[in-house]
Amino acid sequence: MKAFLIDLTKCVGCHDCQIGCKDEHCDQAWMPYAEAEPEVGQFWLKLKQFERGGGSHVRVTYMPTLCNHCENAPCMAAAKDGAVYRRDDGLVIIDPVKSKGQRAIMEACPYHCIYWNDALDIPQKCTGCAHLLDDVDSPIRVPRCVDNCHVDVILFGEESDLDLEGTEVLHPEYGTKPRVFYRGLPKKFIAATVYDPEAKEIVEGAKVTAASDEGTFTTETNSWGDFCLDGLPEADWKLTVEKDGKTLVMDVSTRTKDQGLPDLALA
């Protein structure tokens, strides 16, 4: 069975994957797999950008997203007359003829990866470029997003041939069993700069500890007075900063967002 592997640790946000997808499908129908994708309003592969943290401690995460070609695909369950089907290789395809008027197919996707084409009155999404996979004469035999990515962020192939150790899927709680796997999905972080208000200098080598019911994480401030506690679960933390008998204790939460804190005075 085919699967996608997306390594976010390599993604530089260049949008080549999104551009390649658009180039392949806009104004080009690949029947019986898909009608042409509209130039605007649809992104069968969309590169999402998330700005995380705050102040001087900000990170940007890029995440290519597409149809997850789920094993338990809600769109298949919502479709009538076999309008959505799974190929032998695992790709989930919306039949552009049978799906006409079936808005429930679009509404069934919990990932919001299916779009509605008002002009054609059909739902549309990523096909895994099935037309390229099936064309033995095509110079490109993988999805265009894979071919277009020059830093190997997106891989595609037999699941057994992909290194999926340590990967995750989006929203496993949905129970859809996606076939798009991610490496490096961002976890929460707490970051700040620590300084001594009396000496008017940054504090190097201060011990920083975050403790909660989820565990204890420890680091030290670097030569710039900065620290970052990375890979944190979503939780409420007791943050402690200490050095040379001085201690700062504060409550910090990563339940809803990453924390790029204001400069912390260790007095």
Image (tube, rainbow, N blue to C red):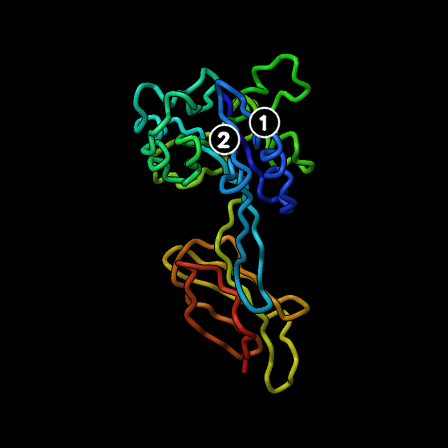
Q: In what element is the residue under mark 2?
A: loop
Image coordinates of residue 256 in percent, x first then y, are: 41, 58
Binning the other alpha carbons within 10 Å of mark 1 as few (below 14), some (14 to 19) or many (20 upward) gives many
Q: Would residue 226 appear left or right of 248 to someone viewing this image?
A: right
Q: In what element is the residue under mark 1?
A: loop
Binning the other alpha carbons within 10 Å of mark 2 as few (below 14), some (14 to 19) or many (20 upward) gives many
Quadrant for residue 93, please give it: top left
Image coordinates of residue 264 in percent, x first then y, are: 54, 75
Quadrant for residue 251, please give it: bottom left
Q: Which residue is mark 2?
A: 126
Q: Would residue 163 appear left or right of 74 to someone viewing this image?
A: right
Q: Residue at x 65, y 29 (%)?
A: 147
Q: Which residue is mark 1?
A: 143
Instruction: First in sequence, mark 1 or 2: give its number.
Output: 2
Q: Nearer the viewer, residue 196 or 181?
A: 181
Asked if 122 appears above or below 43 in the picture, the reply is above
Q: Are marks 1 and 2 in contact (CB under 8 Å)?
A: yes
